[in-house]
Structures are given as structure tokens and as C-alpha cells.
Image (cartoon, grey):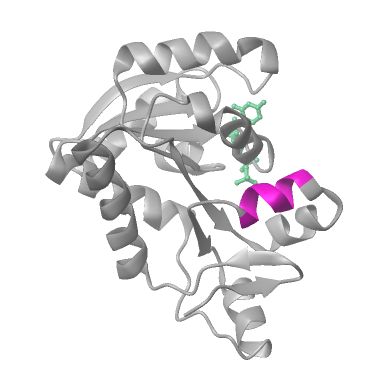
Amino acid sequence: PSPVYVLGVRVDRLTQRQVLAALRQILSSARAGSRPPCQQIITVNPEFVMAAQKNTLFRQCINQAALVTADGMGIVWASRLLRQPTPERVTGADTLVELARLAAEDGYRLYLLGAAPGVAEIAGTRLQELAPGLKIVGTYAGSPAPEEENEILERIRTAQADIVCVAYGAPAQDLWIYRNLQRLPASLAMGVGGAFDFLAG
Ligand code: UDP
């Protein structure tokens, strides 16, 4: 089905399984061919929709992403009210764990960017418990400041990452990915909000 637009913000009407299949497709076609530009996945919750009302760049970033999931029941309910229901909630936290399992199975290399120093390392260890065999090829707190972008992109390049998860909070993380998409040396990038903190407990 075509996406539903909640107050002008796109949400793809996909189940968790379908989201995972789409991610698998993005990663396998990047591995197979001449590497296409990095693809962005965004997990939209009601706060994203509200922020995107005033922030047109954020709205553009969401509406142009490769994949937009319905992160939370608020979005599912809104889609029902609009009579273009999305089948279920697909949270960022669940998607991160599923993505880690997919990466472990198929040998994709994960880079964890953001959160306070030390947090991504602990989150990575936790992800490896949930997804045995997962390759975490780098972690770095850094910051979303534009002055740091070149250095961060170089770190990701050196690590030869396939997937980059960015924890700078919304909308900073998603805009960071969006403005660096053309030169991000990875196949897939996703903003994960507070997921590293959550995983690190
Ligand atoms: N964060 C960061 N640098 C920043 C701003 C935020 O590393 O300049 C991290 C913060 O440590 C946390 C995450 O980004 O791990 C944001 O979590 P939050 O729960 O605020 O994000 P949300 O889930 O609300 O988007």
C-alpha cells in the first residue's frame, strides 16, 4: 500500500516483518552491486510528527527516507483515523535488535555512533548478547556538530561499516544522517534515539 501522511509526515504501512525484509533487501543489493548511496531509515513517533510541523528540513528528511516506520501506537491510531491504517507498531528499539540479528546472520558490520562516552560500547555488548556473532566494528560518542562530521565519516570509513546507528536524539540524528547521506560510507543508517542508553540500562 502507499504510505499514509500524518500531518504531512510520511509513514510506510508495513509490518515489522516487512520492514525487516526491506532492510535485508537494501543491504543485500548494496553488497551485490556498485554501492548505491547510503539509505536512511527513520522511526517516526508522535514527537517526530510535531517537530516536523515547524521544521521543514526534518519533514523533507523523513518524507525522502528509504524507509519510515510507525514507532508507537499514536502513529498507528492516526493512520486508522485517516482510513489508511498501518498494520502495526514498529518501534525503533525492536527494529534495532532485529537489525542486529540480521547483521549477525548475514555478516553485516555495525557501527554505533552517539550517546554519552562509553554507553555505545555497553550497548554493543548487550546487542551481541541478543544477536550472537554480531560484528560491532566501531563505537564513538562524538557529537552532531558539523565541525566533527569529517572526522566521524573517516572513522566509519576506516571501520568498513555496513550499518550505522546514530544516537544523537531526534531530529539531530536524522538530520545528521540526511545531510551526510551522499558521502556516508555505509549501506544503511538509522537514528536510534535513546536506544543505546536503554540497552546499556
Ligand atoms: N545525544 C548525544 N549527543 C547530543 C545529543 C544527544 O550523544 O548532542 C544522545 C544522548 O546521550 C542519548 C540520545 O542521544 O543517548 C538521545 O536520547 P533521547 O532519549 O533524548 O532521544 P529520543 O529517543 O527522545 O530521540
Q: Where is residue 62 in the image (x, y as percent from the top left)?
A: 63, 53
Determine if residue 52 is in view: yes
Q: Which of 139 and 1 is in front in this view?
A: 1
Q: Position of residue 80 (x, y in %)?
A: 61, 87
Residue for point 27% across, 54% down = 25
Image position of 195 with respect to 82: above or below: above
Q: Which residue lies furthest to the front in this view?
A: 34
Q: In terms of image quadrants, where is residue 15?
A: bottom left
Q: Is residue 159 located in the magenta-colored stretch of the structure?
A: no
Q: Position of residue 159 (x, y in %)?
A: 31, 16
Residues in magenta, as a range: 57-63
Determine if residue 114 is in view: no
Q: Quadrant of the C terminus?
A: top left
Q: In terms of image quadrants, where is residue 127?
A: top left
Residue for point 14% across, 43% down = 106
Q: Which residue lies furthest to the right in this view?
A: 54
